Amino acid sequence: MKNLKKNNKKLGILILVIPVGMFLLAFASVPLYDLFCKVTGYGGTIQETFTPSNIVIDKEIKVRFNADKEKNLGVYFQPIKRSIITKLGETNSVEYKITNNTNKAIEAIASYNVTPQKAGIYFNKLDCFCYEENTILPGQTISLPVTFFISPDLYDDPNTNEIKSITLSYTFFNTNNINVRKFQ
């Protein structure tokens, strides 16, 4: 009888601990996944840096630029250049433009991604308009600069040295229904 009570007590504790543990793990999974993506470049996550590369190698790569927007946002959004050829390690600046085609101000924010995803860890942005809320007045056009370089390590990595082109893609979203502070 004592063993049965002891076993029931252990089972009761286990039944309580498992759901609590699952809840805590679920709660922590989003920030942990975000950290994992930033560290590894997984999912096309770009690396952020404040220092340009001090090494430029004579290997060229094509960088394509893509612009998307949330359906019914009411803006015209596009890169000034569709693509460039750059050397690995070379610092580049490009611009996107967004025009508000509505008769009211729009609050919008852009997110980004790099494809192929395995190149994300080597795509280093020095300056970017991503995750900055933009107020675009009716009829207004604004320029959105991006400064970046592709790490020369891309060429040395056997998993990525065959990559000949990378696409940097931005998507603009209306921020009326988004908590912008969680992105900054």
Image (spheres, rainbow, N blue to C red):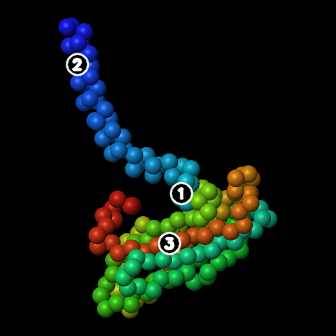
Q: Quadrant of the C terminus?
A: bottom left
Is residue 48 visible in the rendered image? The answer is no
Name which residue lies at 52% across and 82% down.
78
Asked if 27 appears above or below 59 in the picture, the reply is above
The Cα atoms of the two marked residues, 1 and 3, are separated by 14 Å
Q: Position of residue 128 (x, y in %)?
A: 51, 69
Residue tagged 2: 9
Instruction: Check if mark 1's residue and mark 3's residue have beta carbons within 8 Å.
Output: no
Is residue 66 visible in the rendered image? The answer is yes
Horizontal relation, residue 57 to residue 68: left or right: right
Name which residue lies at 35% across and 59% down.
182
At numbered mark 3, what does the secondary structure look like: helix, strand or loop?
strand
The residue mark sitting in front, 1 or 3, is 1
Identity, as a three-letter code, of the amino acid under mark 3 = Tyr
The Cα atoms of the two marked residues, 3 and 2, are separated by 55 Å
Q: Nearer the viewer, residue 161 or 133?
A: 161
Asked if 169 appears above or below 12 in the picture, the reply is below
At numbered mark 2, what does the secondary structure look like: helix, strand or loop?
helix
The residue mark sitting in front, 1 or 2, is 2
The Cα atoms of the two marked residues, 1 and 2, are separated by 44 Å
Mark 3 crowdedness (10 Å alpha carbons): few <14, some 14-19, many ≥20: many
Residue tagged 1: 43
Name which residue lies at 56% across and 50% down.
40
Q: Position of residue 94 (x, y in %)?
A: 59, 76
Identity, as a three-letter code, of the amino acid under mark 2 = Lys
Q: Position of residue 156 (x, y in %)?
A: 74, 53
Q: Earlier in the sequence, mark 1 or mark 2?
A: 2
Residue tagged 3: 170
Name which residue lies at 68% across and 68% down.
165
At numbered mark 1, what does the secondary structure look like: helix, strand or loop?
helix
Asked if 145 appears above or below 122 in the picture, the reply is below
Asked if 2 appears above or below 105 in the picture, the reply is above
